[in-house]
Image: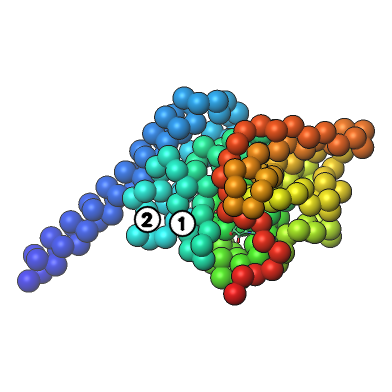
């Protein structure tokens, strides 16, 4: 009997450690094939993508797909972006270690974790209560103590914590929310998908230099919509 229990415990521990090695290898592969083989060159971004356990941010039954080259559902009709898009949007912000960043659209908390690996502090807002609560819990469990999650509409940003060195919106907006641009620090950078509701949008980079706002379209993307009140 004891031998059977021993064998079970032994096999179980091999199984779990193999699964962990596997995720790490998958993550390494994701970084080289999906990011470095494309145009992700920023060291800090690559390191963060190598470190954050993406499989902990997707639903349990989708863990095996966590490192594949696409978005995945995270519940409540929302999605976690494709790893390449997460890395691309991160790289474009040209972040520094002592930066303070605002993210609108916490979702699973994955993008916030990637940002938190690079900068000093991350403020992230999520309009869907259920997602906000579970992201908060997940990020706490993973000891991301430099991330604050706030549940609510991010349209007007987080004025008490402004200005921000970088702002990232991870839901597709029809227009650029003006308060977010206001909360961008001089020389700050903001990235936001903009375009028609449920259509193809442009990832727009907004920069602020000497008070002057510049806009540049970077690439066509699809994103879940930016909403104004929690959908019932
Ligand atoms: N960054 C997330 C994925 C974002 S999906 C991740 O890494 O997992 C887009 C998210 O934006 C969704 O969770 C959606 O509920 C949220 N969202 C949409 N409109 C919003 C708004 N006005 N304020 C805050 N969050 C919003």
Q: In which quarter of the image is residue 145?
A: bottom right
Picture residue at 48% right of the left edge, 38% below the top: 50
Q: Is mark 1 on a helix, strand or loop?
A: strand
Is the C terminus in the top left, top right, bottom left or bottom right quadrant?
Answer: bottom right
Q: In which quarter of the image is residue 7?
A: bottom left
Picture residue at 62% right of the left edge, 33% below the top: 219
* Residue at mark 1: 73
Q: Looking at the image, in which quadrant does ligand 1 appear?
A: bottom right
Picture residue at 92% right of the left edge, 37% below the top: 211
**Where is residue 132 drawn, in percent x and y?**
60, 65
Give 199 or 124, whichever is nearer the viewer: 199
Could you tell me if residue 139 is visible in this image? no
* Residue at mark 2: 62
Of badges 2 and 1, the one in the foreground is: 1
Q: Is mark 2 on a helix, strand or loop?
A: helix
Check whether the beta carbons of the residues at disc 2 and disc 1 lie within 8 A of each other.
Answer: yes
Could you tell me if residue 31 is visible in this image? yes
**Where is residue 227 drawn, in percent x and y?**
67, 61
**Where is residue 99 drawn, in percent x and y?**
74, 42
């Amino acid at each position: 009997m004891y031998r059977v229990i021993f064998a079970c415990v032994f096999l179980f521990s091999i199984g779990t450690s193999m699964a962990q090695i596997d995720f790490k290898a998958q993550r390494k592969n994701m970084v080289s094939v999906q990011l470095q083989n494309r145009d992700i060159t920023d060291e800090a971004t690559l390191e963060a993508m190598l470190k954050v356990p993406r499989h902990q941010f997707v639903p349990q039954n989708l863990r095996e797909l966590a490192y594949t080259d696409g978005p995945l559902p995270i519940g409540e009709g929302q999605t976690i972006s494709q790893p390449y898009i997460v890395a691309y949007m991160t790289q474009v912000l040209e972040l520094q270690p002592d930066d303070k960043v605002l993210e609108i659209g916490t979702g699973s908390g994955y993008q916030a974790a990637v940002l938190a690996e690079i900068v000093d502090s991350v403020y992230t807002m999520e309009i869907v209560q259920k997602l906000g609560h579970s992201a908060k819990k997940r990020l706490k469990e993973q000891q991301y103590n430099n991330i604050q999650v706030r549940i609510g509409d991010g349209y007007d940003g987080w004025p008490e914590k402004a200005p921000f060195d970088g702002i990232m919106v991870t839901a597709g907006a029809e227009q650029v929310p003006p308060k977010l641009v206001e909360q961008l620090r001089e020389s700050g950078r903001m990235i936001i998908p903009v375009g028609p509701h449920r259509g193809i949008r442009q990832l727009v980079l907004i920069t602020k230099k000497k008070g002057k706002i510049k806009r540049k379209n970077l690439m066509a993307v699809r994103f879940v919509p930016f909403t104004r009140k929690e959908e019932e």
